[in-house]
Image: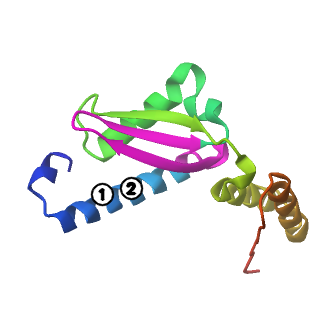
Amino acid sequence: MMAQRSKMSTKRKFVADGCFYAELNELLTTELAEDGYAGVEVRTTPHRTNIIVRATRTQNVLGEKGQRIRELTSVVQKRFDFDDGAVELYAERVNHRGLCAQAQAESLKYKLLGGLAVRRACYGVVRFVMEASAKGCEVIVSGK
């Protein structure tokens, strides 16, 4: 995938980059949901692609002695056909967890899966966000 980029038209390049980002985000969301996954940033250089994973609990993302981040690197490398050493993953801590919408959505998800009442869980999230000096917050829960 990466070797063909020099021959691609601009439209195809943007579409391929968007698909890569979406698939990577989906993969990391499923793998790191319990660790407060809050997004990913991809920085591409001619020799290497740096992938920065944002999470609230970076120690869980890194794993014991960096084992988990190495496993994730190999999974990404195999899934997206990178050469050996062409991709590197980094973990970055979310500075203001209360101002990160994705982290709060995951928090609400685990509160609801844990059996907490919907209204109580939502008010807890709203209170946490507002204490983090946000101007406002809206939580919408739909379905039965």
Q: Which residue is mark 2?
A: 21
Residue found 54% across the figure and 52% down from its top: 29
Secondary structure beneath dot 2 equals helix
Q: Are marks 2 and 1 in contact (CB under 8 Å)?
A: yes
Residue found 46% across the figure and 54% down from its top: 25
Tell me the kind of residue under disc 2: Tyr
Q: Position of residue 60 (x, y in %)?
A: 63, 33
Is 75 positioned to the left or the right of 120 in the image? left
Tell me the kind of residue under disc 1: Asp
Residue 76 among those drawn in magenta: no
User: Which residue is at the front of the view, 84 or 93?
Assistant: 93
Q: Residues within 10 Å of mark 1 (few under 14, many from 20)?
A: some
Q: Is residue 114 above or below residue 59?
A: below
Secondary structure beneath dot 1 equals helix
List the single residue furthest toward the top. 65
Q: Position of residue 137 (x, y in %)?
A: 77, 67
Q: Quadrant of the C terminus?
A: bottom right
- Circle number at residue 84: none
Q: Which residues are magenta?
A: 31-54
